[in-house]
Amino acid sequence: MSNAWQFPIAREIQLHNRVDELERLNEWLEAVGEEAGWPPRAKLDLSLACEELIVNIVNYGFPAGGEHYISVSVSASPLAAELKIEDAGVPFNPLEEADPDRSLELEDRDIGGLGIFFVKQLMDDIHYERTDERNRFRMSKTFSYINKKTNNGKQEDNTDEYRDAGH
Amino acid sequence: MNIETQDINGITVLPLEGRLDGNNASIAEQAFLQQVAEGKQQFIFDFSGLQYISSAGLRVILVAAKKLRASKGRMICASLGEQVLDVFEMSGFTNILEMAATREEALDKFGAGV
């Protein structure tokens, strides 16, 4: 089954299970976004969703240590992206994590659970499955950014804002 | 990320630039802790040059805010860009941290306006 018509661009990258690989991930996403014609803000949002999932895998996926790969693939059009992240670490479904309590006072707040909460907020559709001893995470987003008007009333390209206030 | 803090009328301004993510958040944390070790207690985190923050970056902000709260210090988060402000809002951080639209507004809040 081909998605070539909806998603003319398909790319993949293999990352090591180290946080310094976020730099390579980011350069790769920049390049894909450039090629696909994503709005600048889309690159940041997808970067955030990927970072949060990948940092989770790096931190918890391989308790025995050692060097492992995390595979990230993307299908892209100017208006949408579908991302897949896969690893062979311990079974872990990030969607089962409880959302953080955002009503707590400063003293009682912590960062636990926020990353996955961001992913849920930013992406339209997210899905996890464990098959062939791999964690497979799939997520998609259709971009609904609008151009913000500049002070002189002209539309400024590349300045984006959410259309909905759903987050 | 290379962080050069600045002292303005006794307030320590800590500028953040580029990306504050899982790869470099510890650099910002060290820069902050270094200043605290030197006895600084009043901070402006200046986000004007920051394009991107993740939960790892937010952790540093939270650690700093908690530390200063405990020692009766104070910090203001100033000049947040679009993505950074959205992440602060999603997290509920705009409700628990002191915010300012610009560095100047933050200095005014400290009574240290120039």
Image (cartoon, rainbow, N blue to C red):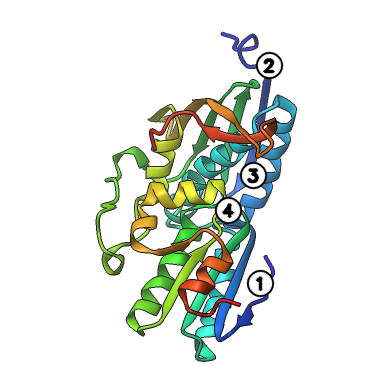
Q: Chain of mark 1?
A: B
**Tag shown at residue A8:** 2
**Disc nearer the start of the sequence (4/2):** 2
4 or 2: mark nearer the eye: 2
Disc 4 and disc 1 in contact, CB within 8 angstroms:
no
Whole-angstrom CA distance, mark 4 to mark 2, is 33 Å
Give the amino acid at mark 2.
Answer: Pro
Instruction: Please tell me how crowded label 2 is: few (under 14), some (14-19), or many (20+) other residues with Cα within 10 Å.
Output: few
- Given contact means CB atoms under 8 Å apart, are the residues at marks 4 and 3 in contact? no
Residues behind callouts 3 and 2 on a single chain? yes
Q: Nearer the viewer, residue B35 or A154?
A: A154
Question: What is the spatial separation of the Cα atoms under label 4 and label 3, in whole angstroms?
Answer: 17 Å
Give coordinates of residue A94: x percent, y percent: 36, 42
Residue at left offset 69%, top offset 36% = A152
Query: Which chain does the residue under circle 4 lie in?
Result: A
Which quarter of the figure has residue A105? Answer: bottom left
State the image coordinates of residue B78 (x, y, percent, origin top left).
53, 63
Is residue A62 shown left or right of residue A33? Answer: left
User: Of discs 3 and 1, which sits in the foreground?
Assistant: 1
Query: Looking at the picture, does residue A152 appear above or below residue A57?
Result: above
Secondary structure, mark 4, is loop
* Viewer can see residue A131: yes
Q: Residues within 10 Å of mark 3 (few under 14, many from 20)?
A: some
Between circles 4 and 3, the one closer to the viewer is 3
Q: Between marks 3 and 2, how big is the CA–CA gap?
A: 20 Å
Image position of A99 with respect to A166: above or below? below
Q: Which mark is residue B3?
A: 1
